[in-house]
Image (spheres, rainbow, N blue to C red):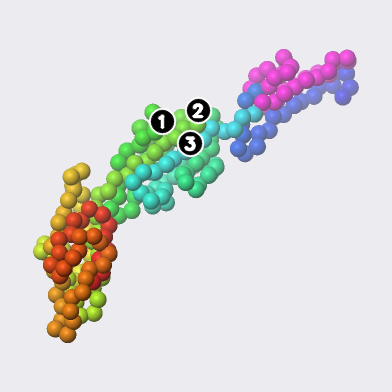
C-alpha cells in the first residue's frame, strides 16, 4: 500500500462462526464488520479480526425413542448435529421459540421442558450454549393379540375379542396406572392349547396380564 491510501478491512465469518470484534489497532476497535485505516509511512498496520463459534441450542428428548418420534415442529436454525440429539446454531442473542415441539406418537404426550432455566417457558435467548430437554409421558399402552389357526382370545372387559378385535389401547390416568385383563384362549376341537408367547405373566389358557407396557402376545 502507498502512504495516504485508505484500506478497508472486512470481517467475514464462516457459516458456523460469528464476528466478535477487532483488536491490534485503535482505529478498529468496535464490532462493525468493516474498518478503514489510512496507511502512514513507517507505521506498520496490525489488525486482528476475532471470531467465535456460534452458540448452540441442543434439544434432547426423554420418554420417546428418538426426536423424530416426538417432535413435529423444530425451531429454525443451522443444524449442527442430529444423531443422539437435535442441535441448532444461532447468532448470539437470537430469540428462539421451542413451544411448538409438543406432538408425539400415539400413546405419548409432551409433558414439560427441563434443562437450562431459560427452557421452561418454551422460549430461549441463545446468548450461550443452551441445552433443553423435551420430557414426554406415556398416555396409553397397547395390547395386541396374534392368534394362531384354530384359536380365539377374549378378555373379561370386552376390549379384546380376537379373531376380529385383536388390539386394544388402555389410557394412563395417573402414575399408579395398572390394568389387569383376564385373557381366555378358546381352542377348536381339533386343536390343543400349548402356550402364550410374547409377554410375561401368560401361562395357561386363562391368564391375567398387567397392562403396563406395550405388549404383543402370540398364541
Q: Nearer the viewer, residue 156 or 173?
A: 156
Magenta-span inclusion, residue 45: yes
The tag on residue 127 is 2
Judged by depth in the image, the label closer to the viewer, 2 or 1, is: 1
Could you say where residue 118 lies in the image, as x and y percent from the top left? 40, 29
- Secondary structure that dominates the magenta span: loop
Could you say where residue 141 lies in the image, as x and y percent from the top left? 24, 55
Above or below, 17 relative to 101: above
**Element marked by disc 3:** strand
Q: How many marks?
A: 3
Locate the N terminus by quadrant.
Answer: top right
Q: Residues within 10 Å of mark 2 (few under 14, many from 20)?
A: some
The tag on residue 57 is 3
Q: Which residues are magenta?
A: 22-50
Nearer-N-terminus badge (1/3):
3
Give the residue at mark 1: 116
Could you say where residue 87 lies in the image, as x and y percent from the top left? 50, 41
CA distance separating discs 2 and 1: 12 Å
Q: Is residue 151 visible?
A: yes
Q: Are marks 2 and 3 in contact (CB under 8 Å)?
A: no
Amino acid at each position: 500500500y502507498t502512504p495516504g491510501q485508505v484500506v478497508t478491512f472486512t470481517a467475514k465469518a464462516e457459516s458456523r462462526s460469528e464476528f466478535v470484534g477487532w483488536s491490534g489497532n485503535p482505529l478498529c476497535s468496535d464490532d462493525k464488520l468493516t474498518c478503514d485505516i489510512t496507511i502512514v509511512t513507517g507505521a506498520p498496520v496490525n489488525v486482528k479480526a476475532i471470531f467465535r463459534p456460534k452458540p448452540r441450542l441442543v434439544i434432547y428428548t426423554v420418554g420417546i425413542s428418538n426426536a423424530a418420534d416426538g417432535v413435529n415442529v423444530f425451531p429454525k436454525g443451522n443444524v449442527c448435529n442430529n444423531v443422539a440429539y437435535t442441535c441448532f446454531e444461532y447468532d448470539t442473542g437470537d430469540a428462539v421459540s421451542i413451544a411448538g415441539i409438543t406432538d408425539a406418537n400415539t400413546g405419548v404426550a409432551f409433558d414439560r421442558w427441563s434443562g437450562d432455566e431459560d427452557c421452561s417457558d418454551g422460549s430461549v435467548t441463545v446468548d450461550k450454549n443452551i441445552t433443553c430437554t423435551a420430557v414426554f409421558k406415556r398416555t396409553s399402552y397397547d395390547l395386541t393379540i396374534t392368534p394362531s389357526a384354530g384359536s380365539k382370545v377374549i378378555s373379561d372387559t370386552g376390549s379384546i375379542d380376537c379373531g376380529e378385535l385383536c388390539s386394544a389401547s388402555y389410557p394412563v390416568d395417573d402414575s399408579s396406572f395398572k390394568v389387569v385383563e383376564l385373557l381366555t384362549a378358546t381352542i377348536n376341537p381339533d386343536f390343543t392349547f400349548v402356550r402364550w408367547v410374547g409377554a410375561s405373566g401368560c401361562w395357561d389358557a386363562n391368564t391375567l396380564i398387567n397392562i403396563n407396557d406395550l405388549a404383543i402376545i402370540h398364541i
